[in-house]
Amino acid sequence: MKYGEKEITHFSHPQHKLRFEISEAPFKCDGCKEVGIGSRYKCNSCNFDLHKHCALPSPFKSHIFYPKCSFQFLPRTPGDIPRFCNACERDINGSVYHCKSCGFDLHPTCANLPSVLDDGEVKLHLYCKASEPCQKCGRKGRSWTYRSTCKKYNLHVACVREMLVESWQDIYLGHGSNSKKLETRIPNLKGTVQTNQQRNKGKVKKCTAIAGMAVQFIISALLGDPTALIAGVVGSLISKA
Ligand SMILES: [Zn+2]
Ligand SMILES: [Zn+2]
Ligand SMILES: [Zn+2]
Ligand SMILES: [Zn+2]
Ligand SMILES: [Zn+2]
């Protein structure tokens, strides 16, 4: 199986073929149980969806932040104890990249977060820890972090994941994955952007724009498809809000 194939058969849903499509509405992935947007593989007979990364995983994966680890893709978490993602700190309830030797875990979408998000205007780099306070929680360290090239903007992957979970409780709890109402509740950073404005008066406009773009960008990446922003999917959801 290769990326870009239109129709696939997946071990977790062998009875029907899954078709590739671009979804403008958020969906819940039946592999990792997290929310997705943009690219997905869908069964048209059942309400069954998979992130691209969950439909076509690599059996093993390495990660630049954990050079000694070898992450194996597992359809569900190993053992009985709760597992948490090293990238976003949230619990893992479905498919996972697991390192057997040290017990590290990554959501499939987190394991595939790009090291650079760049749409030509905004450029964000992924770091293992925050060296500057995060715009959302004010803390350093903690989880993986995206930082803008202008160095003014820092956001924990964990904080963006929290925003998604708060905004999309209904999807996470398993209700109404196709409800229209949910589309208007994409998270934004209104309060966060204001505190940033007070500190840097001269660069207010530019940084506010970057802040807005940055959060949309990280959201798209966490939802499994950074190109969803470029395609305007996430932006169109925000403008409806
Ligand atoms: Zn998934
Ligand atoms: Zn089906
Ligand atoms: Zn390891
Ligand atoms: Zn994660
Ligand atoms: Zn934070």
Image: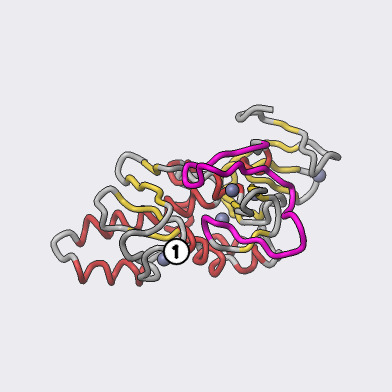
Q: Is residue 205 left or right of residue 182?
A: left
State left or right for residue 202 relative to residue 126.
left
Q: Is residue 76 above or below residue 116?
A: below
Q: Which residue is mark 1?
A: 142
- Across and down, in percent, residue 181 comes to 58, 65
The answer to whether the beta carbon of the residue marked 1 is less than 8 Å from any atom of ligand 5 is yes
Residue occupying the point 40% across, 63% down: 141
Q: From the top left corner, tell me how far across and down residue 232 is, in percent.
A: 45, 46
Q: Position of residue 3 (x, y in %)?
A: 61, 30
* Residue 48 seen from this side: yes
Picture quarter with the N terminus = top right
Figure label count: 1
Other-residue count near label 1 (Cα within 10 Å), few / some / many at <14 / 14–19 / ≥20 = some
Is residue 177 magenta-colored? no
Is 122 drawn above or below residue 207 in the view shown?
Answer: above
Give, as a single range, the part of the protein colored magenta: 59-88
Q: Would residue 241 be seen by someone viewing this image from the given angle? A: no
Image coordinates of residue 171 in percent, x first then y, are: 65, 63
Q: Residue placed at 20% from the left, 62% from the top?
A: 204
Work out which residue is located at the far right of the displayed protein and give it. 15
What is the three-letter code of the residue carrying label 1?
Arg
- The quarter of the picture where residue 92 lies is bottom right
Residue 77, magenta (yes or no): yes
Q: How is the image coloured?
A: secondary structure
Q: Secondary structure at mark 1?
A: loop
Q: Which residue is rendered at x = 15% and y = 66% of the image?
A: 201
